[in-house]
């Protein structure tokens, strides 16, 4: 049934070749270029449900879901229908609209930490603003992030690993001044001691801690039991804020995000991806006393021409409505568990050291014995093997994230049959790599 003989990508290659001269690396966002897995990316033509089609007419089962937003499946008819109606009324207002109240109310009701919310246009923007807010509220400059956690591309957050726990962060990218990251301290995920020692070394100067409550940006790395609770305690002890970056996990790990799932309530939360239903949206929110600092209620400036955009609000509202239906998260968990357990079983049977897991509609598998508890562990993965696996799956019509260090996503549109086909392909590929 699965065959690679008909797989040709001539048009993708042509288009991507042309793109090289038009945009840096031929893309609008780096990971899309497939650099970390080698080979050429496929160029998309259209998406529907659990599937994507490339410009050569090949169909793939999609486990990227436009990096998270497509949790109801691509181009869900109800979302599309609502967008058609909204489109007739205008594409941008730059003025208050009732739609913002609707989505804001839904977010506030769903996410335990959020009493008030501000909409922005991307996850990057949300994280950038939330750092400013942490600093404005506490009057402190330093922040703690974890190596391997991604919070968008703002200067002060472009600090990853490499530098030791106690050292001040050095920028990951040219163009980021040292001064921009000098106040960013880096800790080790799932290591409370690394956080405690930073607080002890920097008394009364740390505004707060930001993290992915379940990591998706160094592959799928869940928090150890007690890790999130420990962070809650440490931050409270030191008068610092705890921020969950739920841009990926919000409305995916559970309707109320990782904070609902794990029962730990941060002070502030960032959102993105799912809440835009496939249109550009980000948001940050939290305790009323903190959010009241944001302009024009308070002095912390932050603004946006397209923020609260009516089309984006509409897609977000419809998507959340679909997710509210009974049984959605059970279905997501069931289908994703089948996939995750199946992949690990096949790896075992075909003799590949591997580890991984899933929560709700988020999963990952590393080609290493594991366990993977942080970024350093993740980096022990066999990246060459992952590249061969990725290419083999692509050739068999399975679209996986083109990096070992990205989580995978399922949707309400993925069927048992899709998972069976995926596992069948995985068995073939793993037998040959
Ligand atoms: C994707 C992501 C971001 C950045 O969001 P963009 O919309 O790409 O700017 C920030 N934080 C996390 C956890 C993310 O997964």
Image (spheres, rainbow, N blue to C red):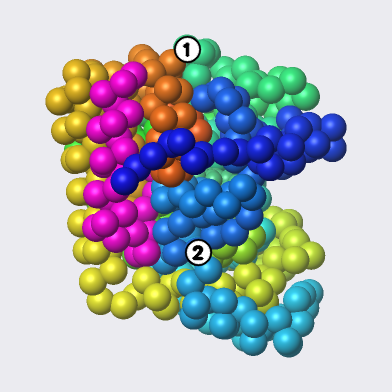
Q: Is residue 32 above or below residue 416?
A: above
The residue at the point 41 percent across, 51 percent down is: 61
Residue 38, position in %: x, y?
56, 23
* Any part of residue 335 in sight: yes
* Foreground residue among 357 and 62: 62
Left or right relative to 334: residue 51: right
Query: Which residue is more in the foreground, 274 or 48?
Result: 48
Name the residue carrying label 1.
Answer: 164
Q: Sequence-wise, which precedes: disc 2 or disc 1?
A: 2
- Mark 2 is surrounded, within 10 Å at the Cα level, by few (under 14), some (14 to 19) or many (20 or more) other residues, namely some
Q: Residue 254 occupies which quadrant of the picture?
A: bottom left
**Magenta-tinted stretch:** 407-433
Q: What residue is rendered at 44% in x and 72% in y?
A: 320
Is 170 positioned to the left or the right of 271 in the image? right
- Looking at the image, the residue that sits furthest to the right is 22
Distance Cα–Cα, label 2 vs label 1: 45 Å
- Secondary structure of the residue carrying numbered label 1: loop
Q: Residue 9: where, in percent of width, then height?
A: 60, 38
- The answer to which quarter of the image holds residue 232 is top left
Residue 181: image x %, image y %?
65, 26
In the figure, is residue 383 to the left or right of 66?
Answer: left
Q: Kindly identify which residue carries mark 2.
A: 48
Q: Residue at x 54, y 60 (%)?
A: 47
Q: Are marks 2 and 1 in contact (CB under 8 Å)?
A: no
From the viewer's side, name the closer residue of 388 and 168: 388
Residue lying at the far front of the rendered structure: 5
Q: Is mark 1 within 8 Å of ligand 1?
A: no
| Percent x, y of residue 333 | 24, 56
- Residue 87 in magenta stretch: no
């Amino acid at each position: 049934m699965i065959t690679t003989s008909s797989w040709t990508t001539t048009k993708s290659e042509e288009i991507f070749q042309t793109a090289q001269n038009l945009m840096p690396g031929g893309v609008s966002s780096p990971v899309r270029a497939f650099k970390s897995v080698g080979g050429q990316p496929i160029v998309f033509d259209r998406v529907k449900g659990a599937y994507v089609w490339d410009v050569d007419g090949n169909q793939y089962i999609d486990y990227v879901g436009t990096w998270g937003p497509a949790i109801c499946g691509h181009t869900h008819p109800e979302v599309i229908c609502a967008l058609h109606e909204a489109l007739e009324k205008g594409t941008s207002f730059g003025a208050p609209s009732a739609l913002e109240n609707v989505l804001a109310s839904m977010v506030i009701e769903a996410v335990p930490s959020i009493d008030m919310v501000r909409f922005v246009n991307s996850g990057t923007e949300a994280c950038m603003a939330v750092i400013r807010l942490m600093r404005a509220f506490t009057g402190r400059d330093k922040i703690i992030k974890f190596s391997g956690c991604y919070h968008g591309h703002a200067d002060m957050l472009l600090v990853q690993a490499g530098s030791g726990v106690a050292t001040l962060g050095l920028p990951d990218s040219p163009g980021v001044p040292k001064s921009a990251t000098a106040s960013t301290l880096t800790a080790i995920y799932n290591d409370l001691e690394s956080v405690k020692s930073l607080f002890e070394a920097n008394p009364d100067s740390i505004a707060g801690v930001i993290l992915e409550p379940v990591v998706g940006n160094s592959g799928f790395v869940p928090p150890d039991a007690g890790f999130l609770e420990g962070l809650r305690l440490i931050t409270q002890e030191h008068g610092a804020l705890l921020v969950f970056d739920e841009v990926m996990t919000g409305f995916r790990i559970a309707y109320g995000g990782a904070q609902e799932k794990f029962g730990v309530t941060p002070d502030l939360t960032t959102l993105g991806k799912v809440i835009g239903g496939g249109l550009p949206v980000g948001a940050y929110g939290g305790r009323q006393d903190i959010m009241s600092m944001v302009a024009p209620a308070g002095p912390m400036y932050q603004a946006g021409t397209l923020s609260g955009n009516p089309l984006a609000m509409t897609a977000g509202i419809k998507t959340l409505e679909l997710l509210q239906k009974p049984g959605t998260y059970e279905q997501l968990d069931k289908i994703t568990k089948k996939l995750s357990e199946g992949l690990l079983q096949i790896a075992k049977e075909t003799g590949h050291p591997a580890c991984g897991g899933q929560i709700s509609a988020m999963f990952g598998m590393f080609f290493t014995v594991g366990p993977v508890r942080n970024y350093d562990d993740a980096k022990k993965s066999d990246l060459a093997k992952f590249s061969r696996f990725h290419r083999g799956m692509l050739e068999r019509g399975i679209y996986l994230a083109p990096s070992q260090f990205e989580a995978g996503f399922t949707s309400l549109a993925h069927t048992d049959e899709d998972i069976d086909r995926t596992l069948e392909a995985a068995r073939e590929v793993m037998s040959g790599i």
